[in-house]
Image (tube, grey):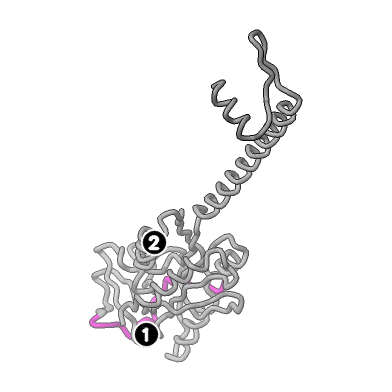
Amino acid sequence: MSRQIREFEEEIGFEIFHRDHHFVEPTEAGQSFIAGIDEMITRLNADFQLARDTARNIARRSSASFIIGYSPFVPAAFRREIRSVQRRKFAYLNLQFRTVFASELVDSISSGTFQAGITFAPFESSSLEQISIGSDRLCAVTPQNSLLTGSPAGVLTDLRLQPLIVACSERRYPILYQQLIEECATAGFKPIIAEEVTSPQEAFDLVLDGVGVAILPFGACAEAPSELQYFPINGLEPLPLIFMYRREDFHRAEILSELADLLREKRLDYAS
């Protein structure tokens, strides 16, 4: 160590220590040099901690929750497709799906609570990007022994006297609700709304209990119990499905663009 210090002193051009056989102490130049080095190390530590904390915050933001809201009646296939992209290209994301009704979805995306959403159109919102990703036809869900044959599809007027269990309401899906009322009126009758449900399972249970015939999107009927049958209804327009997100979400633009392109390319059309 002594030899290395002497070589260093020769390199910098001054002595750091006075030396004799009994005692070693810093020179005046050495004291100034040591104090300067100490300050430099202190600043280096502070800069290192700042750089570390900054990088950690960026890493936390990158791995933060990416939340997609979706209607409980949207086909599960969309969630599977999105998860496949996340696992392949964005494994660092903590991807979450949250069930939410259309009336709440726009506010959640606009405020940044959710990063995107999948729901049924038409949907009134000029502040969000809306990309068409498919369509889904409405089906009648009945017990297997129902007089409605469902072969190959029912007719809207067949439901004229049936109590209906619907997946839309004036509060949760006002546009879809109004669309159903208008299409029934065009067919010459006013629908008998027995129940408004918030999930496919709730609708299945009510049908099994004999409350009425459920009208659900085809893609939501995949988990219907074996005691039930379901078939598309002629006379009702298919429901467009859309992927929504904020145009100004620059931090997640790459992810949102990737997901939008995937869903647009897959374009799942049910019971078409």
Query: Of callouts 1 and 2, which one flags the residue occurring earlier in the amino acid sequence?
Result: 2
The residue carrying pointer 1 sits among few (fewer than 14), some (14 to 19) or many (20 or more) residues within 10 Å by Cα, namely some
Looking at the image, residue 217 sits to the left or right of residue 12; the answer is: left
Q: Which of 73 and 163 is in front in this view?
A: 73
Q: Are marks 1 and 2 in contact (CB under 8 Å)?
A: no
User: What's drawn in magenta, residue-wise?
Assistant: 151-171
Looking at the image, residue 158 sits to the left or right of residue 174; the answer is: left
How far from the left and from the top, in percent, is residue 199?
A: 43, 63
> What count of labels does the image hold?
2
Task: Please check the rendered image and state whether residue 88 is part of the magenta-colored stretch, yes or no.
Answer: no
User: Residue flagged by tag 1: what amino acid is it?
Assistant: Leu
Which of the labelled discs sits on residue 156, or is there none?
1
Name the residue rendered at 34%, 79% in the picture: 269
Query: In the rendered image, is residue 216 in sight?
Result: no
Tell me the element at label 1: helix
Task: Please check the rendered image and state whether residue 157 is part of the magenta-colored stretch, yes or no.
Answer: yes
How far from the left and from the top, in percent, is residue 247?
A: 57, 73
Tell me the element at label 2: helix
Q: Which of 175 and 214 is in front in this view?
A: 175
Looking at the image, residue 206 sits to the left or right of residue 67; the answer is: left
Which quadrant: the N terminus? top right
Residue, disc 2 = 89
